[in-house]
Image (cartoon, rainbow, N blue to C red):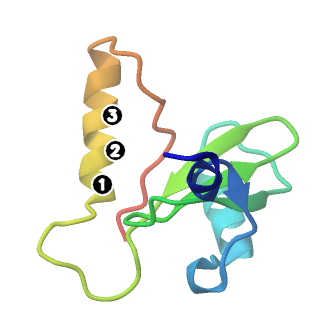
Amino acid sequence: MNNSTNEAYVGTTPVRAAYRLDEAALEAWMRGNVAGFAGPLSIEQFKGGQSNPTYKLMTPNARYVLRRKPSGPLVGNAHDVVREARVLQALGQAEFPVPAVYAVCAD
């Protein structure tokens, strides 16, 4: 990959219009479901890899990653972020070095 191609996939960008989230609803959900969460919340979107849109969530004291299914019709159990979270949790319990899962919203 050349440098210009790498730049298209490295880092974050403002959330693109097609992938916008209800920031107030997300912050309220996190307050109720993520231990120790304290806003205010700001959101950026990771570049590239949009099969499951992935966001960088930032507060004054913490950083989180949010993954979600893409909008629109999906094939079978493709893009199953709940399954992904279960696998990460199981690997973490087996002491593999994986990111912590703070919460899962199945709907």
User: Which residue occupies the extreme front position in the image?
Assistant: 2
Distance from Cα at disc 2 to Cα at disc 1: 5 Å
In this rendering, position of residue 60 left or right of residue 57: right
CB under 8 Å between discs 3 and 2: yes
Q: Which mark is residue 28?
A: none
| Residue, disc 2 | 85
Circle 3 SS class = helix
CB under 8 Å between discs 2 and 1: yes
In this rendering, position of residue 94 left or right of residue 66: left
Q: Is residue 98 above or below residue 76?
A: above
> What is the x, y in percent for residue 5?
56, 55
| Residue, disc 3 | 88
Q: Is residue 69 above or below residue 64?
A: below
| Label 3: how many Cα within 10 Å (few below 14, some 14–19, many 20+) | some
| Residue, disc 1 | 82
Q: Residue at x 61, y 62 (%)?
A: 29
Residue nearest the viewer, comparing 81 with 35: 81
Circle 2 SS class = helix
Given the image, on which type of amino acid does mark 3 rest? Leu
Q: Is residue 33 above or below residue 78?
A: above
